[in-house]
């Protein structure tokens, strides 16, 4: 009896030790990001020690630690092609909390295994803020596509090497969002891309090439409907060679409002939330395209309504004329 009790006690103790050893706190992954500069983090199945096979299905759910959702300036997209998730956003310049913890819950739908990883974002103050921005929309890509195959470095290099050489040392992405998230309608065909709105910022002055390009595409602003495949700009070849189809109607050069404090340190307009500021300006970016589309739609509706009204009036007049003629004919035959 004593031997049985001792054996049972040892088994129970071993199980408790194994359980304790098996419960391992998730390792914290740290990432350093700069305020007012867009960051992204790729969530791979390998992060949870899962094999990304052809028949594998994963679901990733990111959130602020101890909260059900993400911060307003952090966004998440899932790429169904490679089964990777992407966290991205632009840290505002007025954050009081410089360390942000995010929980990433991963679900393997093949095995129903659930794992958690923690990501810590260390947000640093940027030494030099952008004072000028180039804003445009890319038609042929989605947000998640921008994080594949070094597309963002390719895009930056087009400006650094050809269009805005003076920005080579300090050009960075200040904002990135899906066009549909900013109010544009989703494409009718699910296979079509939604489009991506991108802002590139630098403290360097705009180049002569950019000013000439802005003047070159200015006639497009007057069009009721922007040509989707407009390819006749002088710099189109740089973008097409790297797989970018730009919407030239949305291309804008913007000088950001800046002030100087007592130490002559450049700041972005009283440290207003850069994300809110960027979103407001991006609305201006897509406003012209939306406005032209709405004008085109409203004009079409008005023309159809006017045509229906004219047909109705003509039909009414003809009906009255025929009725009067028929009435006179009846009276004539009665008199006979």
Image: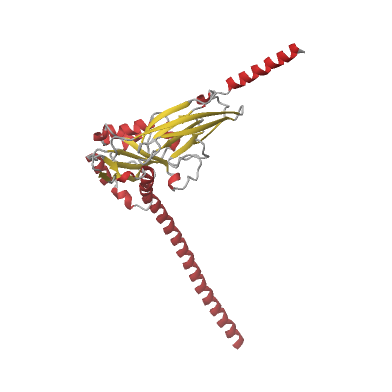
Name the residue: 51% across, 28% down.
Answer: 117
Which is more toward the observer, 318 or 124?
A: 124
Which is more toward the observer, 251 or 298?
A: 251
Residue 222, above or below 64: below
When asked about the image quadrant of residue 209, the answer is top left
Q: Evaluate whether residue 242 shows in this view.
A: no
Residue most extreme to the top: 3
How many dots with numbers?
0
Quarter of the image that includes the C terminus? bottom right
Residue 21, image x, y percentages: 58, 20
Quarter of the image that includes the N terminus? top right
Residue 321, image x, y percentages: 51, 77
Name the residue: 31% across, 31% down.
Answer: 157
Residue 301, image x, y percentages: 45, 59
Q: Is residue 115 left or right of residue 41?
A: right
Q: Is residue 199 left or right of residue 3?
A: left
Residue most extreme to the front: 2
């Amino acid at each position: 009896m004593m031997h049985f009790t001792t054996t049972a006690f040892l088994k129970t103790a071993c199980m408790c030790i194994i359980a304790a050893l098996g419960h391992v706190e998730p390792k914290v992954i740290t990432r350093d990001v700069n305020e007012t500069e867009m960051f992204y983090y790729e969530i791979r199945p390998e992060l949870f020690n899962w094999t990304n096979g052809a028949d594998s299905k994963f679901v990733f759910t990111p959130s602020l630690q101890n909260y059900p959702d993400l911060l307003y300036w952090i966004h998440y997209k899932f790429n169904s092609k490679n089964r990777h998730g992407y966290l991205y956003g632009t840290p505002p310049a007025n954050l009081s909390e410089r360390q942000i913890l995010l929980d990433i819950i991963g679900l393997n739908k093949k095995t129903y295994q659930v794992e958690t990883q923690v990501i810590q974002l260390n947000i640093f103050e940027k030494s030099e803020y952008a004072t000028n921005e180039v804003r445009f929309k890319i038609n042929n890509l989605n947000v998640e596509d921008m994080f594949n195959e070094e597309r963002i470095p390719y895009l930056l290099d087009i400006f650094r090497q050809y269009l805005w050489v003076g920005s080579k040392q300090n050009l960075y992405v200040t904002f990135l969002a899906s066009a549909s998230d900013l109010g544009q309608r989703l494409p009718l065909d699910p296979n079509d891309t939604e489009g991506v709105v991108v802002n590139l910022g630098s403290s360097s002055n705009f180049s002569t090439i950019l000013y000439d390009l802005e003047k070159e595409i200015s006639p497009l602003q007057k069009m009721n409907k922007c040509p989707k495949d407009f390819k006749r700009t002088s710099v189109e070849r740089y973008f097409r060679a790297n797989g970018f189809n730009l919407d030239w109607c949305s291309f804008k050069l913007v000088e950001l409002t800046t002030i100087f404090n007592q130490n002559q340190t450049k700041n972005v307009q009283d440290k207003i939330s850069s994300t809110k500021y960027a979103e407001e300006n991006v609305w201006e970016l897509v406003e012209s395209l939306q406005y032209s589309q709405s004008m085109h739609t409203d004009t079409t509706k008005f023309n159809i309504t006017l045509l229906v009204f004219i047909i109705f009036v003509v039909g009414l007049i003809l009906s009255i004329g025929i009725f009067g003629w028929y009435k006179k004919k009846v009276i004539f035959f009665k008199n006979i």
